[in-house]
Amino acid sequence: MPVPSLHVLILSALLFAIGVIGVLMRRNLVVMFLCVELMLNAANLALIGFSRRLGQLDGQVVVFFVIVLAAAEAAVGLALVIALYRSRRTLDADQLNLMKY
Amino acid sequence: MIVVLFYISAVLAVLAALNLILQKKTMNAALSLVVCLAALSVIYFILSAPFIGIIQLVVYAGAVMVLFLVVIMLLDPFSEVVLRNHNRLWVFFSMLLGGGLFTLLAFAFSTWQPPADTPDIPGAARNTETLAELLFNKYLLPFEAVSILILVAIIGAVVLAKKKHPAGS
Amino acid sequence: MNSLLLWIPLLPLLGFLLNGLFGRRLPKPLVHWIACGVTGASFLLAVIVFQRFLDLPERLVQADYFRWIESGDFAASFGFLLDPLSMVMTLVVTGVGFLIHVYSIGYMWAEAGYYRFFAYMNLFMFAMLMLVLADNYLLLFLGWEGVGLCSYLLIGFYFHKPSAAAAGKKAFIVNRIGDFGFVVGLLLLFVTFRTLDFRTLFAQVAALPVEAHYGVLTAVTLLFFVGATGKSAQIPLYVWLPDAMEGPTPVSALIHAATMVTAGVYMVARSNPMYGRAPETLFWVGLIGALTAVFAATIGLFQRDIKRVLAYSTVSQLGYMFVALGVGAYATGIFHLMTHAFFKALLFLGSGSVILALHHEQDMQAMGGLRKHLPVTAATMWIGALAIAGVPPLAGFFSKDEILWHAFAGGARGHLVFFGLATLAAGLTAFYMFRLIFLTFHGRTRVPEEQRHHVHESPRPMTAVLVVLALLAAVGGFVGLPAWLGPNAFRDFLQPVFAQLPPADGGAPAPHSLAQELAVTGAAVLVGLLGIAVAWVVFIRRGALPDDEKRLGAAHQLVFNKYYIDELYDRIIVRPLTWISEQWLWKIFDAGLVDGLVNGAGALVQGLGDGARRVQNGLARTYLGWVAVGAIGVGLYVLFLFG
């Protein structure tokens, strides 16, 4: 008996929602980052699920690209975090509000 | 048997994700994400995507998370400080949004009517080969574009994270 | 032929472009060589065209160059119409224009903005030639406005002088009032006949039964005449012309005496098929002309500024031309236009020579006895004055005599009143012109002692032009001999243009005899001589000076101050207008309503923005929250509305 596709997709939605809540609730930039990674993975899971359900491998190719992009994003994002920490001595997202009105 | 393994991995992934957003220490949060990613990798294997599962382990749980851990350790003194939101209204709002998104997605997925006849996707033995064919034929251009992108990202990361020379020297 | 014709106005335009764009960097001699070269070439072309034109079997050329405007059933072409009327005008404009350009070399040499002056002059020549050559009313109007613009620019040539700037503005605004009438007339004409092309239009008008469209034609011609009173300085819009003397003297000669101000006369003559069908309008044309002739002449009696005397004289002479038009003697009006261009340009240029010699002194009180210092100027001015006074056999005699004769013998309503007023004006003209001559060139000199040895004759180009113009003023009249002396070549030449004219007022000219004609001529000459004699008695015999005229008391005050017409206009038109503009349009309408709306819109947006900017609190997580809200929104949309 194969795994029901709906359950895969529900798991993906659940992980995505947890990621969103994490991004919104946590103030630490690094943890926010981790939550974004979680959301990306939730999306990947959905793609894999659809790919299997529709019998096409294109979804897996997209997942491959997403992983590459996530690597690039992590590199740039973490570089930004480091640069930011150097200049502001903080990783509190709520204190980085110079750009407000 | 496989199905049971799926559910175990799924519960593990959800628990790890919850731990990620509730954990006080940044290092622990990162480690719980590693657990989550590993669990997802298992699920990928189950869903007949072994290549992606391997990549997930090697690139994601391996390289990317190591990057995270290095940064966390670099900024170590900070990781101890609890930075969580104490504004209850905001917490409620976040929950509401997350719940809303979940409901929406779950509703969308559950009402989705897939086509009835679905061909089998190539099994584990042929998976990598078929994927490579797709990647180097149909998706050649995106592939090259992504390779350029990652090069740019690496250069950008170096430039951004480099210590600025003090002015005048 | 067609391309030759096109180059007549294009050459001055070329000169304008050259001098206007690069003149600042060009050496002065090159500037005037360009300017005079193009006008001279234009004149030569006009002469060549004239020669070929005479040989044509039918003396009419319509050259269509391109479609200028096409919209719905409205079409205006860019085309020229060369008939005897526009031929005469082209020759006069290019000929006199060229002479005055040459004169300007000497007169303007020391002025700043030399290139600017010549550029404007060339632009004026272009616009004026467009005006006279146009084959439809819209193109004519283009030239009409173009000359107005150049007039404004050149009156305000000394723009650093407030009075010159004000005079330029006055000319422009007063002309706008007239142009308003003209434009309304154009619209009415188009609405009625669906065309503005002269030949098509006049053919339609001629084909109409006499009674039909009588009202429309009267309205159109009256509106056109309003335009003409503005451009040609007739009552009540004459006030700008005397002030226009603030411009350099060559400008006064070219634009405000010889050519532009006669545009109104030309336009009425050009529209003769319509005016011929509107006797009511013709009566008003004649009446306004006659009144203006006398009225301006009386103001000229006591003016002290040499150029102002000539300005009022111009207004008066233009009135003469309108009298001729009013009695239906179009050819005679054009004839006077031509001779007037010669002698009035001569008089203005002569006065310019005097003014230059006296270092821009224009008050005749400070002149006198200048004939010893300025022999050429004095002699040529004498000829000009004799010509304008109507002394035979100079040019003015023939044209003026013909106008008086037509006014006397014509069948139009009120022709005898016109005749009386015109004769009176002739006497006044002779008087004030010789007052000018005597006060300027005769008697003992009143030039300040220390300046006397500076006074000397003007440079060669200027005197040469004076001599040429004096020659023209002397013999120019022989092209239009009165009936008892020989064939009137001028009128015969123009005949085709005015041929389809029905007799004004429907009545045939009163029967007249040679004796009557001679009597009118004699009376005109006598009145002129009388005016000269009175001037001689007063200013030579008695040695009166402008200062002495003050003893005449209130009458002198009234006339010297131009009947307080400017003050009257100021009181009844300018000030109420200013008051309404300030108190109502500005303070209530503009400041209250318009600004209120604008500021209100601004304040509203500002308020909204002030509220909206609160959203931008700088906290990344808030923004992410909005992103999530947006994602839900998009999801809902896709799910329930789209899918």
Image (cartoon, rainbow, N blue to C red):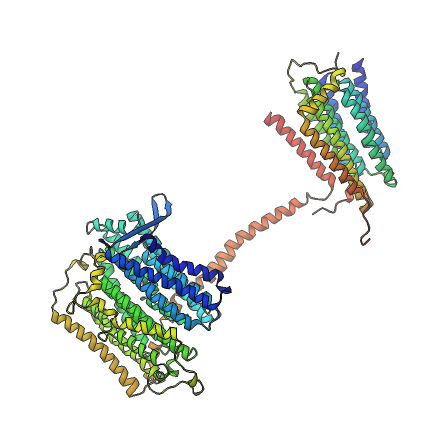
Answer with left or right where residue C64 lies relative to residue B24: left
- At 35% from the left edge and 87% from the top edge, which residue is drawn? C444
| Residue C421 visible in the current orientation | no
- At 32% from the left edge and 60% from the top edge, which residue is drawn? C46
Q: Please say if C305 is above or below B166.
A: below
Q: Residue furthest top?
A: A1
Q: Please say if A54 is above or below B80.
A: above
Q: Please say if C28 is above or below C368.
A: above
Answer with left or right where residue C27 lies relative to residue C203: right
Answer with left or right where residue C430 lies relative to residue B59: left
Answer with left or right where residue C345 lies relative to residue A15: left
Q: Please say if A95 is above or below C451.
A: above
Please identify the quarter of the rendering in which residue B148 is found: top right
| Residue C393 visible in the current orientation | yes
Front in this rendered view, residue C553 or C63: C63
Front in this rendered view, residue B9 or C108: C108
Front in this rendered view, residue C267 or C473: C473
Front in this rendered view, residue C481 or C630: C481
Please identify the quarter of the rendering in which residue C157 is found: bottom left
**Where residue B71 sits: x, y (%)?**
84, 37
Quarter of the rendering occupied by the C terminus of chain C? top right
**Where residue C454 sits: x, y (%)?**
43, 83
**Where residue C260 sits: x, y (%)?**
35, 64
**Where residue C502 sits: x, y (%)?**
18, 56
Please identify the quarter of the rendering in which residue C337 is found: bottom left
Tally of numbered tags: 0
